[in-house]
Image: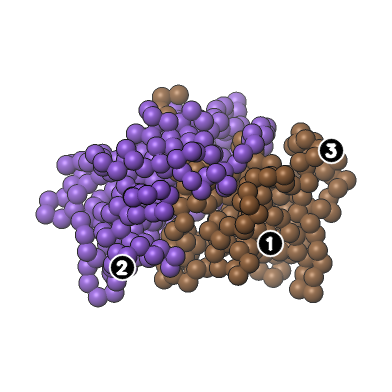
């Protein structure tokens, strides 16, 4: 955990105009699982201003490289990608030394998870899970294989656009975020109830951009995905 | 505000090998689990917290992930924002736990921890609970209070701000079992007994 000179007294609220509703008519399982009553307001106290702190020791040498951390006897199949970006708060300040956890399906659209029954091949050399820490400037970077679309049972002919799941903490449990990163120009985005559950104007923030600068010659395509967490709403006087 | 928040998305059904891999027997090192009391001699009362996450039909979710965040038995959070040195930190107690409901035959989450101390004179002891699952587009925060803290709860400002008829949804029931103290905390996403969730 990095030492900060000013401890916030509270964080800005969740920007509900940027968030999906808990119950979404297009995404079926929200109907019985989404919160149906109003959330209760709560005054921020130490329980909301604190949260777990993962140190550099949390991350192993290959954890950020999904093309290597699941190898058994060779390279995983698929298109190699580099995903990098900056984790910032709403004021534009970097969120340093925070944990980023990721998981995804393989290049055929199949998850290693035992409950994934999609009839696409598993890749013996790809697990699809990784983690890294942001650096002092809030930057993170991991290497992976481009995930593919996969079908799901939400409605007839339902396919999830290619995506990577991300989980972040930031400085407190108030700044906790679980989201999904999508790829630019994916035609499935227009038909995906999970992506579409987020209001237009906000959902586009979940789409990464292709970058030739991040791309490494003859090796991997580069994508940039910046992430914005809630920021301090006030800082105590010195 | 110069930047806008990144929207939340569901954790989906397949989080386990990324977030709770060892619990689900995947070959990937796990950072955190339900064992929040790594030492037998950890100061404070050893407790187990068990519960299930129910949907509108009363079906227990087998693909939910629960996270707990709590102070230690002295009411101190292991975090730089809590500088109250008169309340000691306890070596080895992080205060954070994570558990998926997919490995228990009854879809329960199970945490072994210590009972938290009150964080100040006004509030009764509690644990912050975060719910993630397929079908939940934004994670949901709630609070777990303990059934044997009634006196302190009578003047707890948060509990008292909750409509009286819904307060019970935040109280974990204490049970003394052969193996120790257990608190049951079921979470109802909807229905008559819908748990109170907070806009934290
Ligand atoms: Fe997915």
Q: Say which chain tag 2 marks.
A: A
What residue is pinned by disc 2?
A122
Residue at which label 3 appears: B155
Instruction: Name the residue nearer the viewer: B66 or A119.
Output: A119
Give x and y (percent) for residue B97. 59, 57
The disc numbered 3 marks a residue on which chain? B
**Mark 1 highlights which residue?**
B50
Q: Which residue is drawn at 34% across and 58% down?
A: A105
Q: Are marks 2 and 1 on the same chain?
A: no
Q: Residue furthest front?
A: A156
Question: Residue B19: x percent and y percent?
Answer: 47, 58
Q: How is the image coloured?
A: by chain
Q: Where does the C terminus of chain A fall, quadrant-wise?
A: top right
Of B94 and B167, the residue lying toward us: B167
- Chain A colour in the picture: purple
Foreground disc of the pair 3, 1: 1
Do the residues bearing badges 3 and 1 touch, measured as CB atoms within 8 Å?
Answer: no
Asked if residue B167 lies left or right of residue A112, the reply is right
The residue under the point 25% across, 50% down is A82
């Amino acid at each position: 955990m990095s030492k900060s000179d000013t401890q916030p007294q509270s964080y800005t609220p969740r920007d509900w105009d940027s968030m999906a509703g808990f119950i979404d008519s297009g995404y079926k399982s929200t109907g019985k699982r989404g919160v149906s009553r109003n959330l209760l307001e709560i005054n921020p106290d130490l329980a909301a201003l604190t949260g777990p702190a993962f140190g550099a020791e949390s991350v192993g040498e290959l954890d950020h490289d999904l093309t290597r951390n699941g190898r058994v006897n060779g390279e995983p199949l698929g298109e190699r990608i580099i995903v990098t970006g900056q984790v910032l708060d709403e004021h534009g300040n970097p969120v340093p030394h925070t944990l980023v956890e990721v998981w995804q399906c393989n290049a055929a659209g199949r998850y290693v998870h035992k409950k994934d029954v999609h009839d696409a091949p598993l890749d013996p050399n790809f697990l699809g899970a990784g983690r890294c820490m942001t650096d002092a400037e809030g930057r993170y970077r991991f290497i992976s294989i481009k995930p593919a679309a996969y079908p799901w049972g939400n409605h007839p002919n339902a396919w999830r656009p290619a995506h990577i799941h991300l989980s972040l903490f930031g400085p407190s449990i108030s700044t906790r975020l679980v989201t999904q990163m999508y790829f630019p120009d994916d035609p499935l985005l227009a038909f995906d109830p999970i992506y579409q559950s987020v209001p237009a104007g906000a959902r586009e923030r979940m789409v990464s951009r292709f970058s030739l600068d991040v791309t490494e010659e003859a090796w991997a395509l580069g994508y940039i995905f910046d992430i914005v967490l809630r920021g301090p709403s006030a800082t105590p006087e010195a | 505000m110069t930047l806008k928040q990144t929207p939340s998305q569901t954790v989906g059904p397949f989080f386990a090998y990324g977030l709770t891999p060892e619990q689900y027997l995947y070959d990937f090192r796990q950072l955190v689990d339900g064992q929040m009391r790594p030492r037998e001699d950890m100061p404070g009362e050893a407790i187990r917290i068990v519960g299930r996450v129910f949907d509108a039909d009363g079906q227990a979710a087998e693909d939910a992930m629960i996270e707990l965040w709590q102070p230690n038995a002295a009411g101190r959070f292991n975090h730089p924002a809590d500088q109250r040195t008169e309340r000691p930190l306890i070596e080895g107690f992080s205060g954070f736990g994570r558990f998926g409901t997919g490995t228990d035959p009854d879809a329960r989450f199970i945490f072994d921890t210590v009972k938290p101390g009150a964080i100040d004179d006004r509030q009764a002891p509690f644990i912050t609970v975060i719910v993630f699952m397929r079908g939940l587009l934004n994670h949901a925060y709630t609070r777990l209070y303990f059934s044997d803290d009634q006196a302190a709860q009578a003047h707890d400002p948060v509990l008292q701000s909750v409509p009286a008829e819904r307060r019970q949804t935040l109280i974990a029931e204490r049970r003394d079992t052969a193996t120790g103290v257990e608190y049951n905390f079921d979470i109802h996403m909807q229905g008559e007994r819908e748990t109170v969730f907070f806009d934290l």
